[in-house]
Image (cartoon, rainbow, N blue to C red):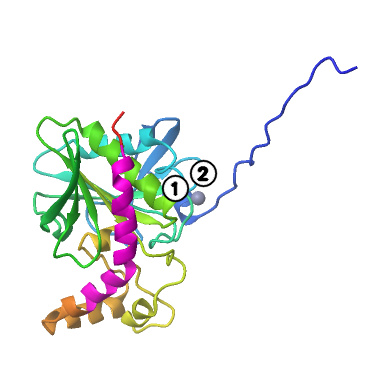
Amino acid sequence: MIEKVKYFEVTTPPRLCNCSLCKAPAVSHCRMGLSNLKVCYNKFPYDKGSLLLISEDFRWQSEVIQDDLANLLYFQSLCNKDSEGKRLYLFYNQDGTGSTIEHFHIQGIIIDDTPLPIEVAPTKELMRLGEITIAKILEYPIYVLSIYGNERANPDEIARVAFGIVQIVEKSLDTPYNLSISHKTIRVIPRRGRTGYEVPEFLKTLSGDPDYAARIAGLEVSGMFIVSHKGLYSRIRALIKSGQPNDFFWKALAELGYTEEQQKKLEEQLHTLRID
Ligand SMILES: [Zn+2]
């Protein structure tokens, strides 16, 4: 006769990781819920004020944001601290959106008050949830949903609504996304498909180097390129000098973002969002 039954939950053992992020030296540490994060200079590539926040223990890149609202609330809170006219702008690249490393990391730049192109694009309101507005960006090459509040809004509510949109994009529509997180706005940039590893042809040819393909991740969709490849840099400079850079970049970004049909499906599901 069995008197005691003990149940052992089967869990995946912690993955041993030895990626370049594991080896990156920390300049500071912070704590995100149960995880320790190390703050590193982003050398991939490096620009002044360019940072990486990396989980000390291995966490999956794809899970940290979409599985726990507390983590998004935490990252939003980091951006709420302005000092001496500088602010932190964070951007997140889910698997398949320019991210090549599965070890959790979120990238940031410390910038002055000059807004990024994505921040100054006009918007059209789609709906309101209490003090929060969900708008889509107009006159911008890639489909972006912008979530912001009025002066009575609690910044937490911005993150809660953005989290709800991420759930629809990832779980219901099965597409990856970039996020941009700034002082008063979170932007969700859903991507047409998972092209992080299979780089589109136009990005392969842009650098002129068969071994190097440009990646369009959260910072690039925000309108800023930091380039570490000389060939790619020269090609982009030539495009800008020609006076027609937008022909190329607008087309490139538009191809990575949601189609009109995907936009419609997402917008139809926005009414299911609630602020609890
Ligand atoms: Zn690692």
Residue 260, magenta (yes or no): yes
Q: Is residue 215 above or below residue 148?
A: below
Residue that mark 1 sits on = 104
Q: CA distance from mark 2 to mark 1?
A: 7 Å
Check disc 2 and report the residue beneath it.
58
Q: Is residue 235 above or below residue 107?
A: below
Looking at numbered disc 2 in the image, what kind of residue is underneath it? Phe
The spot of residue 22 in percent (x, y) is 48, 49
| Count of marks placed on residues | 2
Residue placed most toward the observer, 108 or 120:
120
Residue 84, how many percent across, how many down?
9, 40
Q: Are marks 2 and 1 in contact (CB under 8 Å)?
A: yes
The quadrant of the image that shows the C terminus is top left
Q: Kindly identify the residue that appears in the image at 39 percent across and 43 percent down.
A: 65
Against 132, is 102 above or below? below
Amino acid on which the number 1 mark rests in the picture: Phe
Horizontal side of residue 23 vs 136, given as left or right: right
State which quadrant residue 132 falls in: top left
